[in-house]
Amino acid sequence: MITHTAWKKSSFSGGGEGNDCVEIADLRTHMAIRDSKAPARATLTFPVGAFTPFIEALKKSASTTGPYVNPDR
């Protein structure tokens, strides 16, 4: 299990209490991502070498489509 102190909140946290964001954990050989609003739910885990390309693809997608807006909010 990943300890609470291993998780770091995104620097792009939403307004208010900063709960509208993701958190990451460096697990040495893997990087884990979870929703800060539901930390007990599933996490995405990537080998360290795949994490940077994943983040770059997200940045590229956001720059062409704009940020994701949850229609349920």
Image: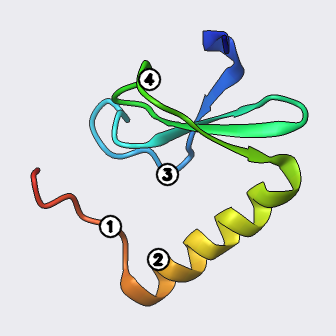
Q: Earlier in the sequence, mark 2 or mark 3?
A: 3
Looking at the image, which residue is at 47% across and 31% down? Answer: 42
* Label 1: which secondary element: loop
Classify mark 2: residues with Cα within 10 Å, few (<14), some (14-19) or many (20+): few
Classify mark 1: residues with Cα within 10 Å, few (<14), some (14-19) or many (20+): few
Residue where numbered disc 1 is placed: 68
Q: Earlier in the sequence, mark 1 or mark 4?
A: 4
Classify mark 4: residues with Cα within 10 Å, few (<14), some (14-19) or many (20+): some
Q: Amino acid at mark 3?
A: Phe
* Label 2: which secondary element: helix
Question: Disc 2 and disc 3: Cα gap in Å?
Answer: 13 Å
Looking at the image, which residue is at 81% across and 38% down? Answer: 30
Residue 39 image position (x, y, % from top left): 44, 23
Quadrant of the frame with the N terminus: top right
Question: Disc 1 and disc 3: Cα gap in Å?
Answer: 13 Å
**In the drawing, what numbered circle is on residue 12?**
3
Q: Do labels 2 and 3 touch, CB within 8 Å?
A: no
Tag nearer the camera, 2 or 4: 4
Q: Amino acid at mark 2?
A: Ala
Q: Is residue 8 above or below residue 11?
A: above
Q: Residue furthest bottom?
A: 64
Tag nearer the camera, 4 or 3: 4
Tag nearer the camera, 1 or 3: 1
Q: Amino acid at mark 1?
A: Tyr
Q: Is residue 72 left or right of residue 3?
A: left
Q: Is residue 59 left or right of residue 65?
A: right
Residue where numbered disc 2 is placed: 62
* Label 3: which secondary element: loop
